[in-house]
């Protein structure tokens, strides 16, 4: 069984003697407790082309210390990583293998580097004896294992690790003390990164980054000599946005598997942004390539939405139920709602994990990699970004405007509901197009995306009300068939109906603001 620990730590270059500085003067530290020296022996695994290292992920099997076992570390923000631990075993546990599948795919994991650390540990505790942080000095010996054994390299580093639930500000105070003692932050983000650099196992990603930087520097240098700033092309801007969404889809895979809150939603949004970008910027990207990929992204979004949509709908109905006074709640309403929600979810999580492990999904990831590496750019992609991208944003806006105009002219009822739902999708597409346009169009694109978000929220609340009413009708029918009172579901139905009417009444005023010409003039400026 795996355990997950949020690890917040910092690493520092240390003198060769590995002596730990005196930190008794740091505010809050009442005592420094010597915990002795431990020998930690870790073998780090990766693909031959170092796909995990490229994304700052480490996978190791370690003996020694208090947490011997398999450790998978995933980035979780500045100075923070989530460490998933499983007990010590000879082979990689299946649950950890699954968490790296979106990166590894069909490649084998091989022992890459072995690190042996002599760790001298101190615990920094407060006046009540509670642990604030761990301070340690590690004398590290690293040896390359793949592609062939190499000569060992050695270094000494100091590490500070915040106690679980601690205040990161304490590490700031501790760092000030350490730098005064002559230490400085390590240039390497992890022991593995330093080992790879110092044993000569440079990753393909590192080389690609250096090459990309060299190309950009050369371009900027030429532009500087010509006396003008290098203007990005439409292809540059759109590809940056596309690659960011591809990275999000891949990086969120472990979070979805671990059932991290909101992870399914965020992955689904990344698929939608990517698909929307393909459609909005068809003058930049070759549809013959992107349309089939868009179809697969739509499939993935649908699979991700099976549970997500029901969760959102259930939460909305629960919110409406909580708003009712006791006298309007009759019958086992909460129990009926819980049964309805759980019945639809039964087995769906297993289905989602099956989708992520399935050949279709892994093929999609490989296709996205290929699209990123060899983008299907049309000739117009070489043009300056401003005009090309502005045209795409305004084109999406015009499509939205036509639908909103139709919705405002329609009488209340089913046809208006459908048109408002279509307008919501167009507002979302215009929003994503404006988000992608920010590097080219600047703050006006950000403001325009904000307007589209406001409109999307109103239209979305209206659509969610329509869906909730369908669900409440179904719940009422189930309650009636079971001999339960369905009065409460009828009351909530009426309240949702009234809310939808309010949103329809609010639409003209909001649209009058969103459609003001000055917003589009600002984009053109």
Image (cartoon, rainbow, N blue to C red):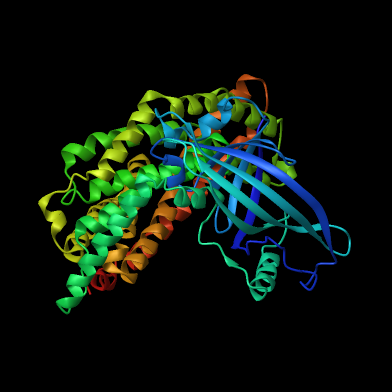
The residue closer to the viewer here, 490 or 456, is 456
Q: Is residue 139 visible?
A: yes
The residue closer to the viewer here, 277 or 48, is 48
Position of 410 compared to 381: left or right?
right
What residue is shown at x 27% (from left), y 39% (from top)? 370
Residue furthest toward the left?
379
Residue furthest toward the front?
151
What residue is shown at x 20% (from left), y 66% (from top)? 386
Residue 210, position in %: x, y?
A: 32, 56
Residue 331, position in %: x, y?
A: 71, 31
Location of residue 362 by image quarter: top left
What residue is shown at x 31% (from left), y 69% (from top)? 442
Position of 127 compared to 356: left or right?
right
Q: Please identify the quadrant where the C terminus is shown.
A: bottom left
What residue is shown at x 20% (from left), y 38% (from top)? 289
Q: Is residue 433 visible?
A: no
């Amino acid at each position: 069984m795996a355990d997950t620990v949020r690890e917040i730590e910092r690493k520092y270059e240390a003198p060769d003697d590995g002596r730990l500085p005196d930190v008794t003067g740091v505010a809050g530290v009442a005592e420094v407790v010597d915990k002795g020296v431990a020998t930690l022996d870790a073998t780090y695994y990766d693909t031959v082309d170092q796909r995990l290292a490229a994304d700052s992920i480490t996978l190791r099997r370690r003996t020694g210390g208090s947490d011997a076992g398999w450790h998978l570390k995933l980035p979780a923000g500045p100075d923070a990583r989530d460490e998933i631990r499983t007990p010590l075993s000879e082979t990689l546990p299946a649950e950890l293998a699954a968490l790296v599948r979106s990166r590894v795919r069909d490649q084998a994991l091989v022992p890459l580097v072995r690190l042996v650390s002599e760790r001298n540990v101190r615990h920094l505790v407060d006046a009540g004896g509670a642990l604030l942080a761990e301070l340690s000095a590690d004398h590290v010996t690293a040896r390359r294992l793949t592609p062939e054994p190499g000569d060992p390299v050695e270094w000494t580093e100091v590490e500070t690790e915040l106690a679980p639930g601690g205040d990161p500000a304490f590490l700031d105070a501790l760092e000030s003390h350490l730098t005064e003692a002559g230490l400085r932050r390590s240039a390497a983000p992890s022991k593995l990164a330093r080992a790879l650099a110092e044993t000569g196992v440079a990753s393909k990603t590192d080389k690609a980054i250096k090459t990309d930087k060299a190309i950009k520097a050369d371009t900027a240098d030429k532009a500087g000599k010509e006396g003008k700033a290098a203007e990005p092309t439409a292809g540059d801007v759109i590809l940056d946005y596309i690659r960011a969404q591809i990275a999000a889809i891949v990086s969120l895979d472990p979070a979805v598997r671990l059932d991290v809150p909101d992870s399914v939603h965020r992955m689904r949004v990344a698929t939608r942004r990517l698909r929307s970008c393909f459609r909005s910027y068809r003058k930049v990207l070759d549809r013959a390539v992107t349309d089939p990929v868009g179809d697969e992204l739509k499939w993935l979004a649908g699979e991700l939405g099976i549970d997500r949509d029901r969760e959102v709908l259930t939460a909305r109905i629960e919110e409406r139920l909580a708003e009712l006074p006791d006298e309007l709640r009759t019958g086992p309403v909460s129990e009926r709602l819980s049964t309805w929600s759980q019945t639809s979810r039964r087995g769906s999580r297993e289905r989602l994990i099956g989708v992520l492990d399935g050949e279709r999904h892994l093929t999609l990831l490989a296709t996205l990699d290929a699209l990123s590496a060899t983008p299907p750019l049309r000739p117009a992609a070489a043009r300056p970004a401003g005009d090309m991208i502005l045209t795409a944003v305004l084109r999406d806006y015009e499509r939205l405007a036509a639908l909103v105009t139709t919705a405002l002219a329609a009488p209340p009822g089913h046809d208006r509901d459908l048109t408002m739902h279509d307008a919501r999708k167009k507002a979302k597409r215009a929003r994503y197009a404006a988000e992608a346009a920010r590097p080219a169009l600047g703050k006006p694109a950000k403001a325009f995306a904000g307007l589209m978000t406001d409109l999307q929220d109103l239209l979305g609340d209206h659509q969610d009300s329509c869906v909730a009413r369908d669900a409440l009708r179904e719940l009422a029918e189930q309650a009636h068939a079971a001999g339960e009172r369905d009065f409460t579901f009828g009351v909530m139905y009426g309240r949702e109906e009234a809310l939808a009417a309010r949103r329809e009444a609010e639409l003209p005023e909001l649209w009058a603001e969103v459609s003001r010409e000055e917003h589009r003039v600002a984009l053109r400026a």
